[in-house]
Image (cartoon, rainbow, N blue to C red):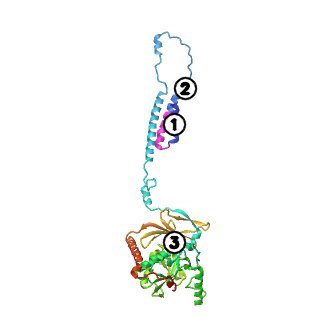
């Protein structure tokens, strides 16, 4: 028993530092010291070998012998042992109960959404704010020159990217517009958006006289056009045709419109009923690239026929805020994954857009993206990447109603496209006839 008491006393000193436990065990220690001291004195006395005593002489008087008889007494230390055992028992019960209570509460179910931590009133308000979670994806620095948002102008040359994405417009077009030849091409996503836009234009106006006269150009084709313009004007440089290697047409994201009706081609100026194109092209990811009020920024004279595909929601933001591509890409450098630019698209869908600088010290760049949302990454053709995140959220109210209306319009467009030949009695013009234009 003494050994157990000593071990338990040492264990208690090491394991219990809380105020309640410390108080109980300090009391135990005091009792143990007293009890242990008493026990040691008694046990030491009992452990000594008994000494032989010489027989005493019997007293002469019986009365005197009776008065000297010793009274029975308890061994010293017995009371201390009993008190120590009682206190230790109480302490053990308290200790087991205390540990059991905390063990029970540690096994209680943890409510989801708080990461196992009960929120205080101060923390609750902060926790209600949405927290963006990101992961890193490695992007080759060569991809800085690829994507819907690459800038190609007099100061930023085009770096040829995957030519396999460039397809013939004629092979993929619908029946509601014309194309100048079978070799007139664009990138696939630009063709898809073009089809949707001109089908919707036909539903809105009944016109099928739009013709795409120019799309993707090789560097050699651009050089030929540039030389022809210099020869016609006698100037050293051209403000109407971009330098070879610096034309958006070489990217496969730009096109030029004209009008074609009854075998006659005429200029497109985007006025009258054709103003619908300028007003709605952003719904399909297109922008009117060169306007008169942005000539100082773009370096190109106004071209009402030239449209550039940049994708959604960028086209909607650029049109709504009257910024050209140069201005838009500069603006995006103010936004990061921590503080993205929030854009509500024309259909109410909410996007987050931000810029990530390219890691020039390496061959690739780690770009932060959300693991649970749709996103795209485009280079800006100079020094970084633009991340566009579809949050999956839709603005309530009028924007939501607009989205529903847009879905209905798309359904009507699809139906009209399927039956266009039956309604108008026309089919797509022969490729050779278009090529003659």
Query: Looking at the image, which residue is at 42% across and 72% down?
Result: 347
**CA gap, disc 3 to disc 2?**
89 Å
176 with respect to 251 (left or right)? left
Query: Which residue is label 2 attached to?
Result: 44
**CA gap, disc 1 to disc 2?**
22 Å
The number of numbered discs placed on residues in the rendered structure image is 3
Q: Is residue 63 above or below residue 189?
A: above
Tell whether position 20 is magenta: yes
Specify the principal SS of the magenta part.
helix
> Where does the image place residue 391, in percent across and percent down from the top left?
45, 66
Earlier in the chain: of badge 1 and badge 3, it is 1
Q: Is residue 329 visible?
A: yes
Earlier in the chain: of badge 3 and badge 2, it is 2
Query: Which residue is label 3 attached to?
Result: 332
> Where does the image place residue 83, in percent across and percent down from the top left?
46, 31
- The picture quadrant where one finds residue 122 is bottom left
Q: Is residue 37 above or below residue 107?
A: above
> Where does the image place residue 331, in percent across and percent down from the top left?
51, 73
> Where does the image place residue 143, in percent across and percent down from the top left?
57, 70
Earlier in the chain: of badge 1 and badge 2, it is 1
* Residue range corresponding to the magenta coloring: 17-32
Q: Nearer the viewer, residue 57 or 267?
A: 267
Q: Counting other residues with Cα less than 10 Å from the Cα at mark 3, is it few (<14), some (14-19), or many (20 or more)?
A: some
**CA gap, disc 1 to disc 3?**
68 Å
Query: Looking at the image, which residue is at 44% across and 85% down?
Result: 271
Q: Secondary structure at mark 2?
A: helix
Q: Is residue 159 above or below residue 240?
A: above
Query: Which residue is label 1 attached to?
Result: 9
Tell whether position 273 is magenta: no
């Amino acid at each position: 028993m003494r050994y157990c008491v000593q071990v338990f006393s040492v264990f208690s000193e090491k394991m219990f530092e809380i105020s309640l436990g410390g108080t109980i065990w300090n009391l135990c220690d005091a009792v143990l010291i007293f009890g242990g001291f008493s026990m040691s004195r008694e046990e030491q006395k009992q452990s000594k070998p008994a000494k032989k005593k010489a027989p005493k002489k019997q007293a002469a008087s019986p009365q005197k012998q009776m008065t000297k008889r010793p009274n029975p007494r308890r061994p010293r230390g017995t009371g201390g042992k009993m008190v120590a055992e009682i206190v230790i028992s109480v302490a053990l019960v308290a200790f087991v109960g205390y540990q059991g209570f905390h063990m029970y509460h540690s096994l209680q179910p943890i409510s989801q959404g708080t990461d196992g931590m009960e929120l205080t009133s101060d923390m609750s308000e902060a926790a209600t704010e949405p927290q963006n979670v990101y992961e890193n994806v490695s992007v080759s620095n060569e991809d800085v020159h690829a994507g819907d948002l690459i800038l190609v102008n007099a100061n930023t040359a085009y770096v040829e990217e995957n030519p396999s994405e460039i397809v013939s417009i004629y092979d993929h077009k619908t029946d509601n517009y014309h194309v100048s030849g079978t070799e007139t091409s664009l990138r696939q996503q630009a063709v898809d958006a073009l089809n949707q836009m001109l089908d919707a234009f036909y539903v809105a106006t009944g016109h099928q006289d739009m013709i795409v006269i120019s799309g993707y150009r090789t560097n050699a084709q651009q050089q030929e056009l540039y030389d022809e313009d210099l020869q016609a004007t006698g100037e050293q440089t051209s403000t109407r045709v971009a330098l070879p290697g610096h034309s958006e047409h070489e990217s496969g994201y730009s096109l030029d419109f004209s009008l074609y009706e009854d075998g006659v081609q005429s200029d497109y100026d985007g006025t009258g009923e054709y103003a619908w194109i300028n007003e709605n092209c952003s719904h399909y990811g297109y922008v009117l690239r060169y306007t008169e009020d942005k000539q100082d920024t773009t370096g190109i004279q106004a071209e009402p026929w030239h449209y550039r595909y940049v994708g959604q929601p960028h086209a909607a933001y650029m049109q709504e805020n009257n910024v050209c591509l140069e201005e838009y890409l500069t603006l995006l450098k103010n936004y990061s994954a921590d503080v993205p630019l929030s854009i509500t698209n024309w259909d109410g869908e909410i996007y987050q857009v931000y810029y990530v600088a390219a890691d020039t010290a390496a061959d690739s760049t780690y770009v932060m993206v959300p693991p649970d949302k749709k996103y795209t990454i485009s280079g800006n053709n100079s020094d970084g990447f633009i991340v566009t995140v579809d949050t999956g959220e839709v603005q309530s109210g009028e924007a939501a109603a607009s989205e529903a209306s847009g879905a209905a319009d798309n359904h009507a467009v699809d139906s009209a496209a399927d039956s266009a030949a039956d309604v108008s009695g026309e089919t797509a013009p022969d490729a050779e006839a278009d090529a003659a234009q």
